[in-house]
Every structure is written in C-alpha cells, then in structure tokens.
Amino acid sequence: MELGMVGLGRMGANMAQRLAQGGHTVSGFDPSPEARQRVAAQGITPADSLQALVAGLSAPRVVWLMVPAGKIVDDTLDTLLPLLAKGDIVIDGGNSFYQDTLRRAQRLQEAGLHYVDCGTSGGVWGLTEGYSMMVGGADDALALLKPIFETLAPSPTTGWGHVGPTGAGHFTKMVHNGVEYGMMQAYAEGFAILERKADFKLDLHQVAQIWQTGSVVRSWLLDLTADALKQNPTMAGIAPYVEDSGEGRWTAKEALDLDVSAPVITLSLLERLRSREKDSFADKLLAAMRNGFGGHRITKE
Amino acid sequence: MELGMVGLGRMGANMAQRLAQGGHTVSGFDPSPEARQRVAAQGITPADSLQALVAGLSAPRVVWLMVPAGKIVDDTLDTLLPLLAKGDIVIDGGNSFYQDTLRRAQRLQEAGLHYVDCGTSGGVWGLTEGYSMMVGGADDALALLKPIFETLAPSPTTGWGHVGPTGAGHFTKMVHNGVEYGMMQAYAEGFAILERKADFKLDLHQVAQIWQTGSVVRSWLLDLTADALKQNPTMAGIAPYVEDSGEGRWTAKEALDLDVSAPVITLSLLERLRSREKDSFADKLLAAMRNGFGGHRITKE
Amino acid sequence: MELGMVGLGRMGANMAQRLAQGGHTVSGFDPSPEARQRVAAQGITPADSLQALVAGLSAPRVVWLMVPAGKIVDDTLDTLLPLLAKGDIVIDGGNSFYQDTLRRAQRLQEAGLHYVDCGTSGGVWGLTEGYSMMVGGADDALALLKPIFETLAPSPTTGWGHVGPTGAGHFTKMVHNGVEYGMMQAYAEGFAILERKADFKLDLHQVAQIWQTGSVVRSWLLDLTADALKQNPTMAGIAPYVEDSGEGRWTAKEALDLDVSAPVITLSLLERLRSREKDSFADKLLAAMRNGFGGHRITKE
Amino acid sequence: MELGMVGLGRMGANMAQRLAQGGHTVSGFDPSPEARQRVAAQGITPADSLQALVAGLSAPRVVWLMVPAGKIVDDTLDTLLPLLAKGDIVIDGGNSFYQDTLRRAQRLQEAGLHYVDCGTSGGVWGLTEGYSMMVGGADDALALLKPIFETLAPSPTTGWGHVGPTGAGHFTKMVHNGVEYGMMQAYAEGFAILERKADFKLDLHQVAQIWQTGSVVRSWLLDLTADALKQNPTMAGIAPYVEDSGEGRWTAKEALDLDVSAPVITLSLLERLRSREKDSFADKLLAAMRNGFGGHRITKE
C-alpha cells in the first residue's frame, strides 16, 4: 500500500526502506536534502515539502511520523492538518509521551482524522530483523494499516499487535523502555561485581558468552553486552556517563501516579542521573555533616 | 568417561541422564530408593551407598555432587573423603556459597584431591536444552573433565567455560542469579504498571508476545513470562509471596564487601523479603508517627 | 493587625487562635457552622460567608487560606477575587503544589492582588509551640505581613523566613516533607530491625528514650516515636498501612525533573505505596516465573 | 569509683575526663606518650603499659576499652586477660560488631570475667553534653558499673540504659548508626533538591534555620547541618566523597539476615559507596549497551 514517511533520520529511513523492500509504495520527506537523497537510492520517492508529500498520496492518505518526541510532533501536525482530509491517517511511530498522544488524537479526531500511535522497538537492528511494534488506535484504522505492520514486523504474525485504543501503544512502549532500564542496570551491576573481584581475574566477555546459551539470564541485551565486552573488555575510553531519553522517567512518574511501587525501574533511572552528577551537593553536605558530629576528615577537592 | 552422581533429585537425575545419553558411564547415589529406581530406567547404575558408588568407579574417580547448598555438602564430603584417593576429583554442581567452596577446596587439597566448582544454570529445562555452566578449578582437573562439560552444555563449545580458579565458578553463578533477580523484578514491575492502567485494558499476554520478537527486552525470562501470562492472565490463585534461595542475598552482601553499589540487585532482593512481610512493624510505626504529628487517621487491623 | 482566615479545620482554627491570642484582630469563615461556632469562643469573629468575611476587613485586606490543596483553593479564589481590590493580599497557608501556586499567583497579579505562599509545618502542635513557616512572595507584601508571621512562629525571630519569590515557600515546604518521609522511614526500619532481633528481647521504648538524649539521631520525630512506643509497644491494632498526602510524590517527581538523584526520599514514598498493596501483581508474577524456570513451589492464595 | 581507660584518643580521653570531673578515680593507658601526657593534665593517672594500668586498679577491676573496632580489640584482650582475675569487668565502649562482641564475651566468661558492651553515641560533643549509651551485659556487672554510666550520660537518668544481654548494646548502637545514615541522606537529598532549584535562589542556611524551630524535621543532625551551611553555604572545597565506618554495612547485612526489608538504610549506604566510585564500570557498560542497541553517542573520557 501507499505511505508517506515524515522524518528520514536513521529510524525513519530504515523503516521506509523495509517497507519499500516489502512491496509498498513509499514516499518520504525530511527537511535535510541529504536525507532525501539517501532514501531516493532505495526506492523511496523523496518529497521536497510536507505539501508535496501529501499531494503525492491518494486518499485515504497514510502519513507516518518518525520525528523526535516533543514540540516537533506538534509543529509537524500544525502543517499537516490543513493538508489532510477526513478519513486520512497519521501514525506517530516515535517515542512520544502517551498523554501528548491522547491530546493530539483529540485534535485530529475533531478534524475527522485518525491518529494511530506505534511504540517501536528494535533500534538500529530493525531494518534487517524487523521492528517490535505496540500499536494503539481505532479498529478501522488498524484494519487498513495491517499490511504495513506485517511488513515492518519480524514476521507478519510476530512482534507487533494492536494493544488498545489510541495512547495504549505509546504507553506500552514507555513501560517497555522502563523494563529495559531495569534489565540494563541489572546486567551492569552484575558485571561490575565480577569486574571488581580481582582475585578471580574473570574474563567478562567469556562470562557473558557462557550466559548467552542455556542460562536463565540469556537475552538480546546480553548478546549486545557480550559484543561490547568483546570489542572493549575494559571499557577503555568510555566515560561513566549514561544518558536517558525520557521514557524511563515517564515510567517512573506514571508508576507513582498509578500507586505502583516500581523500585527497580525507578532506581535504574536514578543511577543514570547519578552517573552524570560529578559534583554532588548531597555528598558534599554528607561529608560536612560527618565532620560536624564525628570530626571525620573531609576530603578536599 | 565415568562419573558418579551424588544426589538424584530433579537436577541431579536430569544431568545424569543427559550424560548417559551422551555416552558416558554414569552411576548414581541418592538416599531415596525411589530416586535410585527412577534413574535405573535411564541407563544409570544406581548405588546403594556412597561407599558402593565410589567402589564402582575407577581412578582417577570423578564424583559430582548435586545436593542442596549448606551442611549436606560438608556431611557428604565427610563420608566421601576417606573413600577417595589422591588425584580423584569432586565437583560441586550445586549453588554453594563460593566462600564455603574455597574452604572445602582447601580441605580436599590437603588430602591430595581436586575440588571443582560448577555453577549450573538452566533449571528444569537443562535436560533437553543443555546446562549453562561456569566452572572453577585447576587446569589439570578441568582438562580431564572436559568431555563431561561438553556433553552437559547446549553444545560442546557454547554455554560453559573454565572461568577461573576454584571458587570462581560458584562466584560467577552467584552473580548470575543476582542479575536474574534484577531482570525478573524489572519485568514484574513493568507488567504491574501495565496491569494497573485500567483504562487501556491491556492484554498482558499479548504484550509479552509482542516483546518476544524484535524488541530490546526479549529474553528467555520473557518467554517464560509470556507462558505464565498465557496460562493464567490474572495470576489467579497465586499468592504474592516470593521466596529467595540464597544467591541473591549473597550477591547483595558481596557487592557491599567489594564496595560496589548495586541498587537494583539489592532492591530486587528487598522486594522479595517485603512480599513475605504481611505484618510490617515498620509500616505500623509509620502509621503511628503520622498520627502523632499530624493527627492522621490510623487504619485499624 | 487584621486578618480573615478561610478554613477553620484544626489547622486553620489553631492558627486563628494563636493569632487572636497574639493580639491580632481575626475573623474567620468555614462552610461548617460548627467550625464557626468553635472559633467564636476563642476571640475570633465568625463570618457566614466569604462575602461577609471580606466585607468585614479594611483595606489592604489580608485573607489567609487554610483549605485542602487542590481544587478547593481554585474554587475559593474564584469567589474571593471579585470581592477583593487592588493591593489586597491572599496567603495560601496549605500544602499546595508550588506549580499550582505559580499559576494562581499569575492570576492574582493580573488583578493587582498579592499572592503569598506559606509552607506551614508543625501540625497539631503548632498552637502551643508555634509554626515553622517558609514564606514566598513579594517584598512589600511580606513587609506588611511580618507581624502575623512573628506571632505564628515559635518566636518572632525563629522558625519562619521569607525564602524567596512566590512559589518558593510551597517548594521549600514540599522538600521539607520529602525529608520527613526519609527520616520517618529511617526510624521505622531501624526499630523494625531491633524488633525482629528476638534473642535480645529489646524494649523499643527504652531504646527510643536512650536515643532521645545525647545521641546523633535525636529529633522531634524521635520524641514522637518514643511516645508512640510508650503507649503501644507492639503497635497492637494498627494496620501496616501508610498513607501519603502528596508532598512526598511531588518531591520525588521534582527531583527527577531537576535531574537530582534522591533515592532515599523516593524509596520512602515507594514503601508507603507498597504498604497499601496487599495483592501485588508483580509479586504474583515473580512467583509464577520462579515456578516456570526452577519448578519452585507457588504459594496458593 | 575506680576505672582504667585503655585508648586515649579523642573519644577515650574525653570520656576519661568527664569521669574524672564527675569524681571518679581514673587512670589511663595509650601507646602514644603524647596521648598519656595530655590526659595527665586533666586529673587522669597515666599508665605506661597495660600491665601498669591493671596493677594500679583494685579488684574487682574495671577496664574500659576505647580502641578502634577490629583486631586491636582482640590484641588488647590477649594482653589483658592474663593480667585480670575472676570478677573483673572489661567494657568495650567502641563500635565493635556485635557478633565479635558475643565471641569475645564467650572467651572472657570462660576466664570468669565479665564483658560489657557499651554502644556510645555523641562523638565530639559528648564531653560537654554527655554520651548516649546502649549497654549490654549481665545484671550484676551493670549494677556495679551504674555510677560510671550515670556520670557519662547527659544526666544520671537519661540517655543511657541497660538494653539487654552482652551484645545487645553494640547491636542497638549498630542500628542507631544505620538510622543515622538514613537521616543524613534524607537531609542531604532535600538540600540538594533545594540547591538545584536555581530560579528560587534559596538560601540553604536560612531554610535549615527555619526548620530548626517548630518543624517536623528538626533534629540535632539538622542543627549540625545548619552550622555547616552557615560556615560554607556552597560546600566550597569539599569533595563529594563520603566515607562509611562499618556500622551502616553491618546494619544492612543484619537486616538481610533477619529478613527485614530496610531499603532506606541500605540505599543510604550504597550512596556512600557510589560517592567514592569515580570510574564506575557499570556506568561505562551501560553507555556501551546504549550505543549497541540504539546507536546512542558514547561520551569519551
């Protein structure tokens, strides 16, 4: 079927390419001319503007947004909405906060448009392995979009699903990322303990490799960890500095709002904040307090 | 090669069976006559006593202990040691605490015997899928035992390894289990958040199934979780009561001893303790304090 | 000076009484006739309506809101605003979320009114001991209100302060309560450990009493804890059920928004959520997982 | 009464001085001649050796150990034991681990000696304010020692108590310190949040001062914190590096052994470990994993 992809960064370009390879008619827009040129070589029709992109699609039009979460989604919708007509479908395939999605869906519904949210996992590996997709939206929109999800997924029947009404897709993806934070932190702590146990001189790559087959902790994240430890067993040159990209803190806050105690997901996030805190006021104050009541030595900066 | 298995519970019996199927000559002892009878049907020679087991092996004898961690290991060694001769090998395949292993290895070394520790993962699935094994011990003992590990592992070259000196195997397995606690808790929290979000009416089994293919959080534990959610989507009839079997708390304490901050592994353990605490004194005292300073209502039992 | 108190629950009535005792001219409104009658006996002029309350004050009018955080504050402002004139001052002495305060201040400022936020600690003890007050607002409003704060505080110069612009008072009070959560949980855990150590048969009230004098952990909360343990050493009849009233979760979320890792404050809140979770889905799923990979027994409900 | 103090560091010297000022006959030994000279000026009889110290005491002798926890206690007992006679009393006033105390008490009991453990709080302030003391031991020994504790405590009846059999004193002090860790971390996090909220430009010393009177979080630790913030509002020149001195990790481990979930005390300890970890392997591995699955940028060292 026909689809217009908005946003041709790595994720958007790869998804467009997987769709084109799967026999779909894909056009694409990105403000960067280089990004447009890159996809042209892969069977995707580049459009110079959102207007041109929409003009090239036949009704009901399907537009897939693959842009960073936040204001850019709203700005893109501002431009898109006047161009679209009743019955058209906009899919947000990015990591938007599900409450933003609910708000946007309301806006599109008032214009007679469908808004579908697709939480997408798979990252840089999706082009070849397929994407895991949690989709929220109305039944009739989903019925129309089925061929697209069947092509993007690892197989037509696995790795994707219509999980609920609009918002449910991004909500599920948000929690997916929260779980991911917890798993990553669990592995990281485990390998840090192994690394610190100097008397056993453990080969961390070997341990990861053993765990990859037959063990209870085998996983795709462990496969990645094994690769990372193979390439760089001592993590040389890598700063102990861990970013977070939003979903983890949304999950932590959502858990609070739902009165669910989620200590491991929450602590995984706090550890990332902590990794970026090289000059902790709390720790300085603790050192000062210890000096105050016990005369304990303060380490000078 | 020839091996005597001590302990024919599910784990020991399955390992003996996998070895027998792999062409090894396996005898086995268990205090339970029923356990001995069961393995006899699977090509394993049952022995009525440790004495008989050892008498039936040719030197250098290889005895594999698959008994619960703790005093039983020491008791078994008390009986075994006088029966063994210089150059014989005892393997502890159970979940012993690595410091107990170091102590026992010292004792066996003084008697000229080898002590090899094998941290074994794979549980009830090992018979068919193979076991993941982290092995500690001396090089010459390991060289002799190689055919055994090659048969027990998922394949001769995957899922097992000689990770270091005696103790290193159980140490690595201990940390493996710590990581497992963290991963399990991460999944459990994630699904609890999804379950609590009533307005989306999410089908947790469907979500697990989507995540199983292509997602960043796919893993063997997730496969199990999907199975559990398929059989019992609401966890009906299951008490919110989570046991722990030692390795998690050893890992948490070891991390403290090594000055490694491991909040996620540690909190995963605390959550299990918490699940068994139905009458928390701390919570009662908190309720009493709130009443004291703010006049907040106390819920009566 | 002259002040109208809106909300004559325990907190509002006590504050009005302390002000009247301090020589101020205090009137008060509460929708409950009983509440109005109660304060009339304490030298406070009851008003039948907000209209009557405002009508009885001379300009610049000072109205102190002591109503529950949330919608009631906005509703009260809806009624109050048309009654007030340029230069009048509204003080919110409740536990409002500081971002609501910022929004409300904006609204009042547009009408030429001052909005002052006073985070108030001291609870049921404030009438006799004085209130600890963190005040946010404009300098000129604060200059006018100084006599009120000097009367409400433990002494004219202690226990209160103008901490910053509007919003800063409620922000500081919010963090105060976050710290309170952490301290309470620290004590609760400590006494729970002492209580569990059965072989020492410790008298928890005695321990609290020892700590009250000379120790590093002495505090007002410990005084309360000692009282609670004296009256009810075993916490008999008290359910292990701990409410939270908003400030803790605001603090936890604010810390995330500020990228500050605050694990102890956050975990203190999660423990309260946990205390109310008697049928944890997460724990049931963990039990089911353990059964899946290790054949571990599930406890039936 | 008569007492010999072993260890004339700051704590021991101050306690000896408070006892001498209270009318007791105090002698003291320390390997450092300077330490011995210092106390001589304060009415304490210095002894050149443990032998001389014991020789100068009349039976039943009372010897108070104020030496660092660990091997030094055992070494001191090795020397002392042959010098003492049946009925003599040794008090360990230091921060020994209570299980070491139980072991040592067993040894002394076999020699007919009493062993009394006194968990001592109050640090550098004890000389003037008195010490908070949690004492474990046999009733008859305690009856004899009562005058000593009445002098050391803030008053004869407050701040000290006989909490249980030998070991109970150090156990209670250990938990006291665990609670202290939690409280300190709660304050530290609170002030760190206040400090980070740049738009309110809060004066942290002012906030601490407000909280010191009338608030729910007032405490002696807060008084110290206010002092620290007065002297150094920005914590300039202080490294964010927090030591721990044993009791916190003993408490965390003991909670695990007792199956008590103590997340706040435990996390307070982990935060201290974390403060000393400037090159976290876990964080580096997390950064490498993020790069692996999402192509996220790694920060170079």
Image (cartoon, coloured by chain):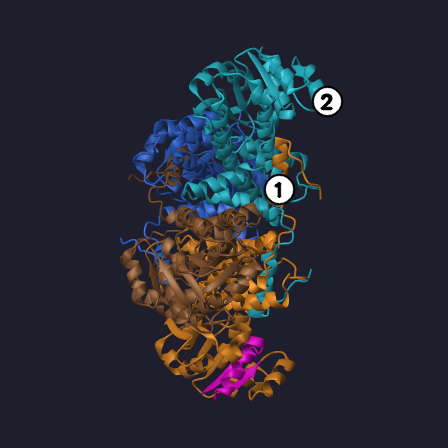
Chain colours: A blue, B cyan, C orange, D brown
Judging depth in this view, the residue of A121 and D35 nearest the camera is: D35
Q: In the rendered structure, which disc, 2 or 1, sits on the residue that comes first in sequence?
A: 2
Is D169 covered by the magenta stretch? no
Judging depth in this view, the residue of B81 and B148 nearest the camera is: B81
Residue B187 location, x and y as percent?
Answer: 55, 40
Judging depth in this view, the residue of D258 and D298 nearest the camera is: D258
Going by the numbered disc 2, the residue's amino acid type is: Glu
Q: Label 2 belongs to which residue?
A: B34
Residue drawn 43% across the image and 19% down it: B139
Q: Is residue A60 above or below residue D86?
A: above
For residue C286, side relative to residue D208 (left or right): right
Q: Is residue A19 visible?
A: no
Q: Secondary structure at mark 2?
A: helix
Is C3 covered by the magenta stretch? yes
Going by the numbered disc 1, the residue's amino acid type is: Val
Residue drawn 39% across the image and 82% down it: C144
Q: Label 1 belongs to which residue?
A: B242
Question: Where are the magenta residues, as a range?
Answer: C1-29
For residue D142, side relative to residue B42 (left or right): left
Mark 1, Cα crowd under 10 Å, few <14 / some 14-19 / many 20+, is many
